[in-house]
């Protein structure tokens, strides 16, 4: 069964050596229901709003299965929120989700899969792992950002149901790895709503054809 196993939001802003000076990557599990609105979870924040947040990056989901992979690889626990995710899931192939796919979580919340997470320097500093951005990229397990289609509450234990999956079949993992011209054309011709980043990736891929 596909479930949300943890709901995470910022615990506190931490000092960071990047250009912003602070980071909101320190997400931690919270108990009970949390309201999710178009810009994300209630009481959650993003410090660097140029690169994080916004309607197409309102919620970041990461799979327990991928976290367990990294835990084994790194020899350390990857507790919910360590990667800055809002939702930790089980039974959901997050990286294998199709861009434009829709999830119903609980009774009313509806989310749409938009783009993969792109690792950055803040993430690398949080992890403290040598060449982390390259390693995370090469492993191809980025997790997915989601847009809020219908607001509603979310809590650990809520079921996740896929209500729509675009026929083009192009996954978050494929977008993360770089689209081929053929796959880019499939997305473009589908008529599905595309996040601006996916549109840019499609354009770049088609320019190479």
Image: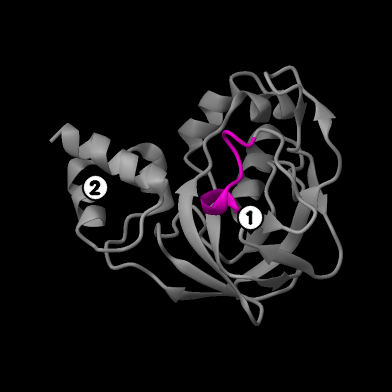
Q: Is residue 164 above or below residue 182?
A: below
Q: Quadrant of residue 128?
A: top right
Query: Residue at position x 85%, y 45% from top?
Result: 11
Label 1: how many Cα within 10 Å (few below 14, some 14–19, many 20+): some
What is the x, y in percent for residue 13? 83, 35
Residue 177 point in image, percent of width and height: 38, 38
User: Does the magenta run of residues contain 56?
Assistant: yes
Q: Nearer the viewer, residue 161 or 191?
A: 191
In this rendering, the answer to whether 124 lies above or below 35 is above
Could you tell whether 101 is left or right of 190 in the image?
A: right
Quadrant location, the N terminus: bottom right
Q: Position of residue 195 (x, y in %)?
A: 41, 51
How many dots with numbers? 2
Foreground of the two, 159 or 17: 17
Does 139 appear in magenta?
Answer: no
The residue under the point 65% across, 70% down is: 3
Quadrant occupied by the C terminus? top left
Q: CA distance from mark 2 to mark 1?
A: 28 Å
In the displayed structure image, the side of residue 165 where residue 30 appears, left or right: right
Question: Nearer the N terminus, badge 2 or badge 1?
Answer: 1
| Magenta extent | 49-64
- Look at mark 2 in the image and give the residue it sits on: 184
Q: Taking 208 as reference, is 78 above or below it? A: below
Which residue is the site of mark 1? 39
């Amino acid at each position: 069964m596909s479930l949300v196993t943890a709901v995470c939001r910022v615990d506190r802003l931490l000092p960071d050596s990047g250009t912003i000076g602070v980071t909101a990557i320190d997400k931690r599990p919270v108990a009970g229901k949390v309201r999710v609105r178009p810009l994300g979870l209630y009481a959650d924040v993003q410090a660097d709003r140029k690169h994080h947040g916004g309607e197409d990056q309102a919620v970041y989901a990461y799979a327990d299965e991928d976290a367990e992979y990294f835990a084994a690889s790194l020899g350390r626990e990857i507790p919910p929120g360590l990667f800055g995710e809002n939702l930790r899931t089980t039974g959901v192939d997050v990286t294998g989700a199709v861009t434009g796919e829709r999830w119903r979580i609980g009774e009313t919340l509806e989310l749409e899969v938009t783009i993969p997470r792109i690792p950055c320097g803040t993430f690398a500093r949080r992890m403290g792992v040598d060449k982390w951005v390259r390693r995370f990229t090469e492993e191809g397990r980025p997790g997915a950002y989601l847009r809020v289609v219908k607001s509603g509450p979310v809590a650990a234990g809520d079921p996740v149901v896929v209500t729509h999956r675009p026929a083009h079949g192009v996954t978050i993992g494929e977008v993360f790895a770089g689209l081929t011209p053929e796959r880019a054309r499939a997305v473009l011709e589908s008529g599905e709503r595309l996040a601006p980043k996916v549109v840019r990736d499609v354009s770049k891929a088609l320019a190479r054809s």
